[in-house]
Amino acid sequence: MLNSLASGRRLALRLLLWQLFVALVVGLVFAMVGLREAIAAAAGAVIVALGTALLSVRLFGQVGDGGFALGRFLTGMILKWIVIIGGMIAIMFQYKLPPLAAITGLVVAYAVNLLAFRFKG
């Protein structure tokens, strides 16, 4: 085994914390434009963090064989996308927050994924 389960949990926690930090930062940046934009941008990033947390809990919840882990990964990924798509629909259509700010928050939070896996510090 190249990577331990504990290492994966630490990486998932670090990714989640960075995504929440980015949600705060993007919310503060959009606060210069307006309160609704700040809420939309932060909410867009937070739903990505919630999806990541859901996937992590699902993936690292139990230890099993390869097929079991693959099944947990796939169901976790499906649940993550349900949370993200449902959250974006709620942000844009139910709460009528600015879509550009929400999508920006979503994209910035996903950009953290690229950086988290690039640097293994």
Image (cartoon, rainbow, N blue to C red):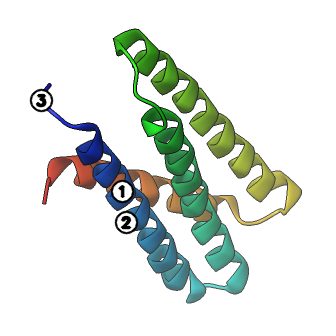
In whole angstroms, how far apart are the C-alphas of marks 1 and 3? 20 Å
Q: Residue furthest bottom?
A: 32
Tell me how far mark 1 sits from mark 2, CA to CA: 5 Å
**Can you tell which mark lies on residue 97?**
none
Q: Quadrant of the N terminus?
A: top left
Residue farthest to the front, as pictured: 63
**Mark nearer the viewer, 1 or 3:** 3
- Disc 1: CA contacts within 10 A as few (<14), some (14-19) or many (>=20): many
Q: Mark 2 points at which residue?
A: 18
Q: Mark 1 points at which residue?
A: 15
Tell me where residue 57 appears, x and y as whole percent.
51, 43
**Secondary structure of residue under mark 3:** loop
Q: Quadrant of residue 86?
A: top right
Query: How far apart in space, not on screen, are marks 2 and 3 (Cα)?
Result: 24 Å
Q: Which of marks 1 and 3 is nearer the N terminus?
A: 3
Kind of residue at badge 1: Leu
- Check contact, mark 1 vs mark 2: CB within 8 A: yes
In the displayed structure image, the side of residue 20 where residue 50 appears, left or right: right
User: Mark 3: which amino acid?
Assistant: Leu
Q: Which residue is drawn at 41% across and 66% down?
A: 17
- Which residue is depicted at the point 84% across and 63% down? 95
- Chain-order first, disc 2 or disc 3: 3
Q: Where is residue 67 in the image (x, y as percent from the top left)?
A: 41, 10
